[in-house]
Amino acid sequence: HESNFNSLFDFQFVNNKTGFAVGMNGTIIRTDDLGITWNKIKSNTKKYLKSISFLDDNTGLIVGGGGTILKTTDGGDNWKLLENISNNALNKVRFINKDLILIVGNHGTVLTSKDLGETWSLVEPKYFNNWNDILVGLKNNIYLVGDNGKFVELKRGEM
């Protein structure tokens, strides 16, 4: 399906018909009919938005350029710009479970939240790599993947 929106980087469906996609220039688009039609949602930013993750139908986060973090608690109708913890580009957000959220980004940036994104902690970087994705393994091990083939396990005690 083609759209007339800016370049898109990530998407997620939150139930059997509603989904969101994010991209350049603060683009957030939403479908409520399995992607047949898409409508633009106000993001209150012009930064690029790189990753989106929902815990459930209501609670979601978006991350992107310049340390941008957006949060919704109403199913994506409204997005609140959270205070910057890092000015580095943020590349991926992932709800590990209701008690742990991870964000990774450039220059070794790893952020954690244990209260649904209300407060964030910066994990002291061991590697100043650009992190691009977060993987949760079969035994709930957490791995980060990044530029130059870098792949590391993030120990729960390090968060």
Image (cartoon, rainbow, N blue to C red):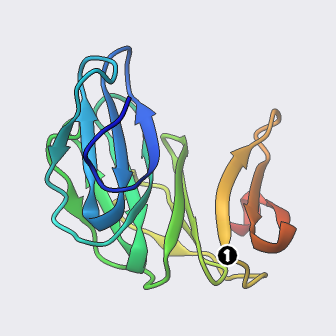
Query: What residue sits 38% from the left and 30% below the top?
Result: 56
Query: What residue sits 82% from the left and 36% below the top?
Result: 139
For disc 1, the neighbor class at 10 Å (few under 14, some 14 to 19, many from 20) is: many
Pick the residue in front: 152 or 50.
Answer: 50
Q: Position of residue 32 (x, y in %)?
A: 23, 22
Q: Is residue 33 above or below residue 44?
A: above
Q: Position of residue 77 (x, y in %)?
A: 15, 40
Quadrant assignment, res 103: bottom right
In terms of secondary structure, where does tag 1 sit?
loop
Residue pointed to by mark 1: 130
Query: What residue sits 29% from the left and 75% below the top?
Result: 83
Q: Quadrant of the C terminus?
A: bottom right
Q: Is residue 88 above or below residue 142?
A: below
Using residue 133 as the reference point, say whether residue 16 is left or right of it. left
Pick the residue in front: 33 or 145.
Answer: 33
Q: Is residue 34 above or below residue 44?
A: above
Query: What residue sits 45% from the left and 82% below the top?
Result: 86
Quadrant assignment, res 149: bottom right
Using residue 94 as the reference point, say whether residue 115 is left or right of it. left
Q: Position of residue 17 (x, y in %)?
A: 32, 17
The disc labelled 1 sits on which kind of residue? Asn
